[in-house]
Amino acid sequence: MSALTLVPPAQIEDALKKMWEKLAKENKTRASLFNLIVYTHQNPRSDFMRSRVQKIIDNFPCRVLFITHDRKKREYLKTAVSVITPQGKDAQFACDHIDIGVGGKSIKKTLFVLLPILIPDLPTYLLWAENPCKERDLLSELEKLASHLIFDSETSENLSHFAKSLLACHKEKKEVGDLNWARTESWREMIAASFFSSENLRELMATQSIVIEYNAAKTPFFIHFKIQALYLQAWLTSRLKKKKISFKLKPVKRKDVMGGGIISMEFSAKKGFSYSFCTSKEDPHKIIINRETKEKCDLPRHFFLSRDVLGLSLTKEIIYKGTSNHFLDALKTIAKL
């Protein structure tokens, strides 16, 4: 990303135009597939969200409107512009980046800055990187601008309230997503593939106990470690529709796995079979799959997870069309907790 240039809100477009006049000489193409509005508080996690936005740019060009709110400071509003280019590529395109910093109650003025700089006729996505159960006034206004709302349940203090909030958004004909749900995708795909055959599916339906281990090692960006495990529990509960199934969520510590990431899952029943899906100690992206019965023990199989779960979680929420019914069912299950 080029250096940010402070400009008054009324001069944002003129400042970007001058930047692009210079970049045109370098054969850079100005590209935008959609508007991406990001809202986050001013804290160490805001830099983390900027790095996630860079992952979007690496795959899909868009106009980024990044709002950083410092609730502890007096009122202020400042805007700056820059140009973002994909990292690690000799790309011929680049994207507009508009930074909006606000302090205190000046957040109420944000909407008046946003409206003139949204590119018309392009879809708008909102990444709300804070608790959607709070600051409802601004969220309600931004929801009107966006066709797709993306949240991060890591910021939620109560997952049940979070789930109810997302279900309410979807009821208002909005597409919704959550980064923690997206981060569990590889595990869900692996489980679905492992129990695909009719024999394996019968064993899954006979499962009586499921143990899920998740990473509870401290990290600067994750403190609610149980969320991904709860999502998998809710997903399995909604899919299996069984009342007599025991879940145990077990915290462990692994420095080589992202905060809250799944370490292992074990399915078992009194009939004498068990399935285990365990993260390799040598490679955290490799899952070792074992199946045992009273009669035999299958040879271990391997499944490889994505090496950039954090980056791809946001990318996948951007490219998915609609809201997954599996996600909605999981939210409904969590909302009842």
Image (tube, rainbow, N blue to C red):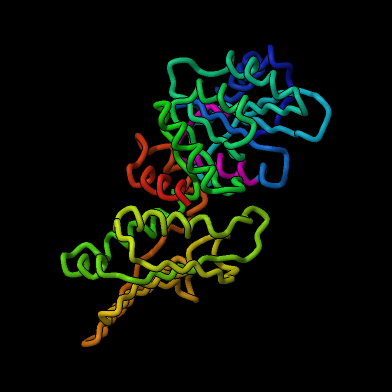
Q: Taking 271 as reference, is 302 above or below it?
A: above
Does the stretch in magenta take in 87?
no
Asked if residue 18 shows in the view, the reply is: no
Q: Taking 227 as reference, is 276 above or below it?
A: below
Q: Residue 162 at x, y = what percent?
A: 53, 42
Which residue does the image show at 32% across and 62% down from the upper left? Answer: 191
Q: Is residue 280 left or right of residue 108?
A: left
Corner quadrant of residue 106: top right
Which residue does the image show at 49% across and 54% down from the upper left? Answer: 308
User: For this rendering, which residue is in front, 293 or 336?
Assistant: 336
Q: Residue 185 at x, y = what percent?
A: 39, 53
Total numbered labels placed on residues in the image: 0
Q: Is residue 255 left or right of residue 143?
A: right
Does the stretch in magenta take in 51?
yes
User: For this rendering, which residue is in front, 297 or 123?
Assistant: 297
Q: Which residues are magenta?
A: 48-64
Asked if residue 16 shows in the view, the reply is: yes
